[in-house]
Image (tube, rainbow, N blue to C red):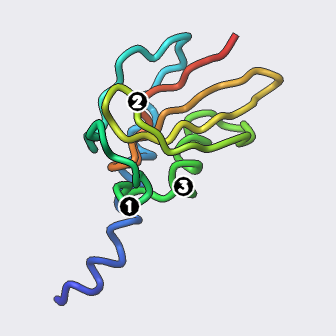
Amino acid sequence: MTIQPLIRIIPLLVLVVGLSATAAAQATEDCGPIQGTITVADDASDFAAMAQVTEAQAQEAALGAVAGATVVDVDLEEEYGFLVYEVDLTLDGQEREVYVDAGSGAVLCVETED
């Protein structure tokens, strides 16, 4: 087997792992310190080059965590020293922030806004 077919399925595997971790994410009022897989240095600026998960994959993982929600905004940012996607959702008039690891696609936390 050559490496070419393996390279093609890696993004799919990342998404599957992220979606399977979704069940472990619980909605909370405050996520507190979260831990991702990509550490961000203080002087880092090119977050897009560091991310191993696309914005679309992060959105899909977030929507898997909050079924029926609508995506309002997606930001790739540093949280507690780790690179994450913050996906803002609305569901039944309530805002939620879903933090998705930019390295694995795992849902790290679902935060309910007041």
Q: In the rendered structure, which disc, 2 or 1, sits on the residue that comes first in sequence? A: 1
Marker disc for residue 55: 3
Q: Write down the residue under mark 1.
A: 49
Relative depth, front residue between 90 and 33: 33
Quadrant holding the N terminus? bottom left
Tell me: 75 left or right of 35: right
Q: Write down the residue under mark 2.
A: 79
* Three-letter residue code for mark 2: Glu
Q: Could you classify mark 2 by the number of other residues whose Cα lies within 10 Å: few (under 14), some (14-19), or many (20 or more)?
A: some
Q: Secondary structure at mark 3?
A: helix
Residue 83 picture quarter = top left
Q: In the rendered structure, which disc, 3 or 1, sits on the residue that comes first in sequence? A: 1
* Three-letter residue code for mark 1: Ala
**Label 2 to label 1, Cα distance in Å?**
17 Å
What residue lies at 74% left-to-right and 31% top-to-bottom? 90
**Label 3 to label 1, Cα distance in Å?**
12 Å
* Three-letter residue code for mark 3: Glu
